[in-house]
Image: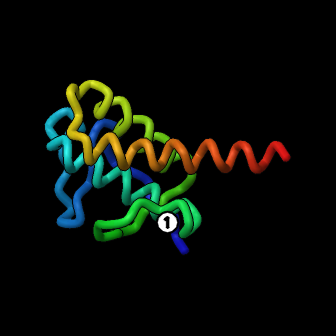
């Protein structure tokens, strides 16, 4: 399987191959993009339900990490976040903490 690299560090590529700067994405689109990456990399028991999925499993780890960092940074600029986004982010954070705790045993 070929790993795909992003052509633009400050943009999200949509399923229609459109590049959108993170700063111009809707807050819901930022969250859905983050959730898509999460659901492609997290075990089933930790996945956040909902959404369509496209391609993150073909990205290199470095690309996924850069995209997650950029998406989270932009979400952190958007205040206040809707409760449903906060709940999804909390679910992801709790799953990550659970993973770290289980590795320490």
Question: Element under label 1?
Answer: helix
Residue 72 vertical placement versus 60 (above, below): above
Q: Position of residue 81 (x, y in %)?
A: 23, 34
Q: Position of residue 92 (x, y in %)?
A: 48, 48
Q: Position of residue 60 (x, y in %)?
A: 54, 55
Q: Residue at x 22, y 58 (%)?
A: 14
Between residue 5 and residue 85, name the one nearer to us. 85
Residue with the most extreme right position: 105
Report which quarter residue 70 is drawn in: top left
Q: Residue at x 46, y 40 (%)?
A: 66
Give the colour scheme of this rendering. rainbow
Exactly how many numbered labels are in the figure? Answer: 1
Q: Position of residue 46 (x, y in %)?
A: 53, 60
Between residue 6 and residue 66, name the one nearer to us. 66
Residue 16 vertical placement versus 76 (above, below): below
Residue 78 vertical placement versus 41 (above, below): above
| Residue 55 relative to residue 32: left or right | right
Between residue 103 and residue 65, name the one nearer to us. 103
Between residue 44 and residue 65, name the one nearer to us. 44
| Residue 24 relative to residue 10: left or right | left
Q: Residue at x 21, y 50 (%)?
A: 29
What is the quadrant of the N terminus in the image?
Answer: bottom right
Give the class, few, some or many, for how many residues have Cα within 10 Å of label 1's Cα (few <14, many ≥20).
some
Q: Residue at x 49, y 66 (%)?
A: 57
The residue identified by callout 1 is 57
Residue 18 vertical placement versus 21 (above, below): below
């Amino acid at each position: 399987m070929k790993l795909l690299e992003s052509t633009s560090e400050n943009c999200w590529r949509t399923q229609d191959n459109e590049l959108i700067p993170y700063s111009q994405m809707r807050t819901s689109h930022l969250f859905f993009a983050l959730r898509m990456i999460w659901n492609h990399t997290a075990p089933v028991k930790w996945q956040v339900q909902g959404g369509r999925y496209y391609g993150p499993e073909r990205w290199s780890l470095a690309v996924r990490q850069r995209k997650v960092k950029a998406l989270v940074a932009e979400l952190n600029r958007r205040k206040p976040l809707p409760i449903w986004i906060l709940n999804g982010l909390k679910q992801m954070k709790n799953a990550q903490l659970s993973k770290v705790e289980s590795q320490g045993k």
